[in-house]
Image: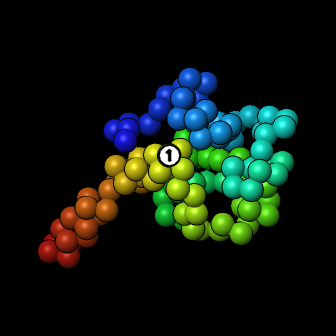
């Protein structure tokens, strides 16, 4: 798995292999983009690693989805394709909203308790 996030979505071979159209919040969803989960027309963006657990708004953590799949998925990790597994691996490596891994958070918590 990757040790750092991919930089250019246009040359991401993993996205192409998994059939994922790379998307971002800075541009509209391209026409005729299909839901990553059910194959219908995509009308929204879904965070693979949800915001509620520290998922980032980077293109490698976003999958095109229809509204129904996005709402049904909620805060769960549902897909096990390599594109989604890479997003999970990057999250575990510390690429998250606060930038801290679980081990760092535990260490900081223990330091606060001791002081």
Up/down of 46 relative to 73, above or below: above
Residue 28 occupies quadrant: top right
Quadrant the C terminus occupies: bottom left
Q: Position of residue 96 (x, y in %)?
A: 44, 51
Type of colouring:
rainbow
Q: Residue at x 40, y 50 (%)?
A: 89
Which residue is farthest top? 11
Taking depth in this image into account, of 23 and 77 the one nearest to the observer is: 77
Q: Position of residue 40 (x, y in %)?
A: 82, 51
Taking depth in this image into account, of 71 and 19 the one nearest to the observer is: 19
Up/down of 27 relative to 108, above or below: above
Taking depth in this image into account, of 27 and 23 the one nearest to the observer is: 23
Quadrant the N terminus occupies: top left
Q: Residue at x 61, y 54 (%)?
A: 47
Residue 103 visible in image: yes
The residue that disc 1 covers is 82
Q: Position of residue 50 (x, y in %)?
A: 56, 60
**Pointer 1 local density, CA inside 10 Å: few below 14, some 14–19, many at least 20:** some
For this view, does 104 lie left or right of residue 82? left
Q: Residue at x 34, y 49 (%)?
A: 93
Q: Residue at x 56, y 23 (%)?
A: 11
Up/down of 92 relative to 19, above or below: below
């Amino acid at each position: 798995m990757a040790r750092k996030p991919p930089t250019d979505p246009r040359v991401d071979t993993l996205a192409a292999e998994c059939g994922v159209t790379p998307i971002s919040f800075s541009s509209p969803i391209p026409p005729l983009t299909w839901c990553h989960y059910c194959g219908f027309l995509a009308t929204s963006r879904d965070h693979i690693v949800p915001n509620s657990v520290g998922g980032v708004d980077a293109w490698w953590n976003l999958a095109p989805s229809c509204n129904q799949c996005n709402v049904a998925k909620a805060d769960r990790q549902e897909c096990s394709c390599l594109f989604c597994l890479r997003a999970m691996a990057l999250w575990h490596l510390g690429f998250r909203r606060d930038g801290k891994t679980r081990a760092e958070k535990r260490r900081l918590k223990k330091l606060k308790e001791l002081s």
